[in-house]
Image: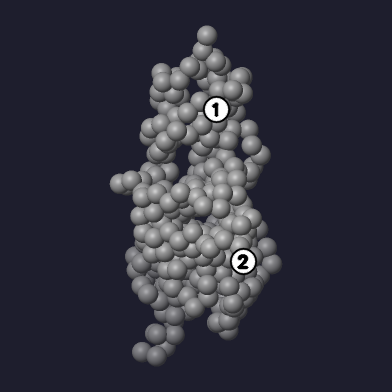
Amino acid sequence: MENDSEEELSRNEQEAIAWAARRANASEWNASDEKAFRYWLEASPTNVEAYQNAQRTLEIMSEPKLFKSGEILQLKGLAQYPSQTNKPHRYWIPSLLSIAAAIVLIVFLRPNTNHSFQTAVAERQQFTLPDGTTVELDAQSKIEYDFNDKKREVKLLAGAAVFDIAADERPFQARALDLVINDIGTIFSVRLRSNLGESYGSASAVEVAVAEGIVDVLSKENSQESPVRLTEGQQTVFAGGDPAPLIQDLRSNAFATWRESRLRYHGSPLGEVLGDLQRNYTGKIVLTDPSLAKLEVTGTLRINKLRETISLLEDILPIHVREFSAERLIIDKRL
């Protein structure tokens, strides 16, 4: 029985390393992979622990995201649904994976980790940080994280993210532009509001909303002010260093609606709306008249149905779509 237990532990570790390595390569990961991974993760508490150790291990290794396609194919042989892993695996990925397995068995300290995750156009994906925190990223979004023995820090560089914070003795801090968001056990979202034509990662405002728990939000431009505290069901928007942003109650089912391919607007400039649509469109959106960007939009738009959404905007605003193709969307002022 003792030998069986040791064999089972070894198999969990191998599978965990395989999953961690594959998830580090965004180009080799898709929705079905994520579903299979979640199924495996929830199959056993030991899988969760083994996966967290594997993630920490891979962070130690130089450039863990740069695996070759051949190695990824071999990793797929290890990372499968639990029903397909009844028999112990008798083989190892050469070089990198065998080294990783050896490290997993001896590394239990938290290494300093500083890496990033990002999504492509029209792609939404969930990632797991080394502490077990999950982060769901909107289309064309990017985060960097820096973890060590004393802190957990994440920076949102573009787009939007939902954080489901894992319990840990270390404080968790999220940053966006000049904002510092201190978590007090919660699920919260951060969204950078960018207008059409702004460079990657630029934004004019930051929206913070809380689904569960509490966060304290502080602007570094107004570091002498007391932090803004948000509780469950509240949101606020920081723009232009405003020292006293308005705290609002979230409307029903209004938390991070981009996860359902919907975005709600209330008096938002058309430039911001088109900026959101651009992250979900592989072509280029062009406003021929810059003044159109200031037109106000109120309503709920489907960001995964671009033609339908543009047609709706054309009905309610003085705009005219001159061209709409896979390469470009040109919008004129209606005469």
Q: What is the x, y in percent for residue 302?
A: 40, 34
- Check the image and name the residue furthest to the right: 62
What number is the disc on residue 326? none
Q: CA distance from mark 1 to mark 2?
A: 38 Å
The residue that appears at 57% across and 20% down in the rendered structure is 330
On the rendered structure, is 65 left or right of 136?
right
Q: Residue furthest top?
A: 335
Query: What is the number of the mark on residue 146?
Result: 2
Q: Residue at x 61, y 61 (%)?
A: 223
| Residue closer to the observer: 292 or 246 | 246
Identify the mark nearer the N-term, 1 or 2: 2
Q: Position of residue 272 (x, y in %)?
A: 53, 35
Which image quadrant for residue 41?
bottom left
Seen from the viewer's position, the closer of residues 176 and 41 is 176
Whether 217 is drawn above or below 266: the answer is below
Numbered label tally: 2
Indicate the position of residue 54 as horizontal and vertical percent values: 53, 72
Residue 195 percent location from the top left of the image: 58, 35
The secondary structure type at the circle numbered 2 is strand
* x 38%, y 64%: residue: 213
277, above or below 84, in the image: above
**Closer to the camera in the image, 176 or 295:** 295
Q: Which element carries disc 1, helix, strand or loop?
A: helix
Which kind of residue does numbered mark 2 sit on? Asp
Q: Residue at coordinates 61% horizontally, 62% vertically from top-left?
A: 224
The residue to which callout 1 is attached is 294
Q: Residues within 10 Å of mark 1 (few under 14, many from 20)?
A: few
Specify few, some or many for label 2: CA neighbours under 10 Å numbering under 14, 14-19, or 20 or more. some
